[in-house]
Image (spheres, rainbow, N blue to C red):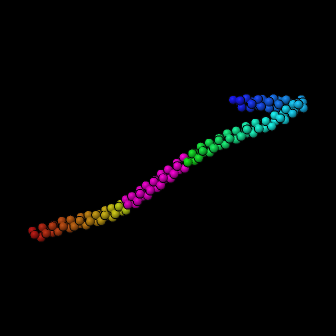
Amino acid sequence: MGMSLVFSAKKRFAFSSLLTPFACRSSATSGKMAATAAGSVADVQARFGHSVKGLLTEKVTSCGTDVIALTKQVLKGSRSAEFLGQAARNMVMQEDAILHSEDSLRKMAIITTHLQYQQEAIQKNVEQSSNLRDQLSHLLK
């Protein structure tokens, strides 16, 4: 607490000396100011040290936050890459299924064509057999 009173007294003196015009100062005041300037410089250095520490702490916190955000983004990108990989594998599987289905459809079309040929052959045989039956029945009469 005693330290804060010393700093506040120095601050008040430094501030009041800044407000006093330079031409109005006496040589005694100049001597006092020179003596307090050393104290004032120490005060400025202390404040600078505190402000640098504060800025450094602020920057470290900011960098830590940025690293966390970057890590989250990398993990999100990694998950996205996993999802894309899974989608690609699924697409390849679907493509294989489609190719297999297409091959099966071709085979079914060939089988259908063969069945149509067989149906036509059977119809011709039925017609020929009915003609033969008519001829046999006519001969047997």
Whether residue 93 appears in magenta in the rendering, the answer is: yes
Residue 77: image location, x then y, percent? 53, 50
Q: Nearer the viewer, residue 139 or 133?
A: 133
Q: Quadrant of residue 36?
A: top right
Determine whether 14 is above or below 134 in the image.
above
Nearest to the observer: residue 112 or residue 46: 46
Res 91 seen here: no
Q: Residue at x 44, y 58 (%)?
A: 92
Q: Which stretch did the figure color magenta?
A: 72-101
State whether residue 95 is above or below residue 50: below
Q: Main secondary structure of the magenta part?
A: helix
Q: Position of residue 95 (x, y in %)?
A: 42, 58
Residue at the far front in the pictured view = 2
Horizontal and vertical percent position of residue 141: 9, 68
What is the quadrant of the N terminus in the image? top right
Query: As rendered, which of 57 and 41 lies closer to the eye?
Result: 41
Q: Quadrant of residue 117?
A: bottom left
Residue 61 appears in view = yes
Identity of the residue drawn at 52% across and 49% down = 75
Question: Which residue is at a point 85% across and 32% down the rendered structure image?
Answer: 32
Residue 59 position, x and y percent, is 65, 43
Q: Residue at x 63, y 44 (%)?
A: 60
Judge from the rendering whether residue 20 lies leftward or rightward of residue 113; answer left or right.
Answer: right
